[in-house]
């Protein structure tokens, strides 16, 4: 169970850093463009969360982005990366920001 706790803490820290970074970027863009800050943050969280969820849940099929090659492995389902969990956290934060902006 020790490994699971460490992985959950790492996912939480990565999600928090993503949320803070994307929130600050969205706030700067909103102020510069004269748009609503909370609605811009909500849209940013929705879009980036959906992308992370899709990337994390899509089966790789043996293709490696780092090596650029395919192996003979067959797709066995999702990539088993916790990226999709960070995506879900961002979508949830987008919902909260959207509710707050209304």
Image (cartoon, rainbow, N blue to C red):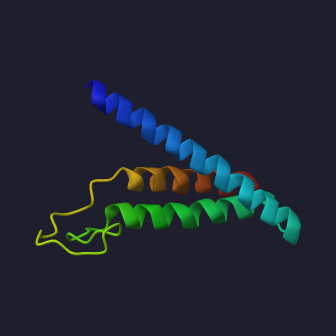
Residue at point 51%, 60% (across, down): 49
Is residue 67 positioned above or below 89 on the image? below
Q: Nearer the viewer, residue 46 or 67?
A: 67
Residue at point 61%, 56% (across, down): 94
Measuring from the top left, give residue 71's x and y in whole percent. Answer: 16, 71
Residue 102 appears anywhere in the view: no
Q: How many marks?
A: 0
Q: Is residue 78 rendered to the left or right of residue 40?
A: left
Is residue 85 positioned above or below 62 on the image? above
Measuring from the top left, give residue 99's x and y in whole percent. Answer: 67, 54
Quadrant showing the N terminus: top left
Q: Is residue 84 rendered to the left or right of residue 42?
A: left
Q: Is residue 56 rendered to the left or right of residue 59?
A: right
Residue at point 51%, 44% (across, down): 14
Judged from this view, the residue extending furthest toward the bottom is 69
Measuring from the top left, give residue 88's x and y in whole percent. Answer: 46, 54
Q: Is residue 28 rendered to the left or right of residue 41?
A: right
Measuring from the top left, give residue 38's x and y in whole percent. Answer: 75, 57
Residue at point 48%, 65% (across, down): 50
Judged from this view, the residue extending furthest toward the front is 67
Residue 75 appears anywhere in the view: yes
Quadrant showing the C terminus: bottom right
């Amino acid at each position: 169970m020790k490994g699971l706790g460490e992985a959950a803490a790492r996912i939480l820290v990565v999600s928090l850093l993503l949320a803070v970074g994307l929130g600050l970027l969205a706030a700067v863009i909103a102020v510069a463009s004269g748009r609503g800050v909370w609605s811009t943050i909500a849209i940013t969280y929705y879009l980036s969360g959906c992308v992370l969820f899709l990337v994390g849940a899509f089966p790789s099929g043996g293709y490696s982005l780092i090596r650029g090659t395919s192996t003979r492995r067959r797709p066995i389902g999702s990539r088993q990366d916790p990226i999709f969990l960070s995506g879900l956290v961002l979508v949830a934060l987008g919902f909260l920001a959207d509710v707050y902006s209304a």
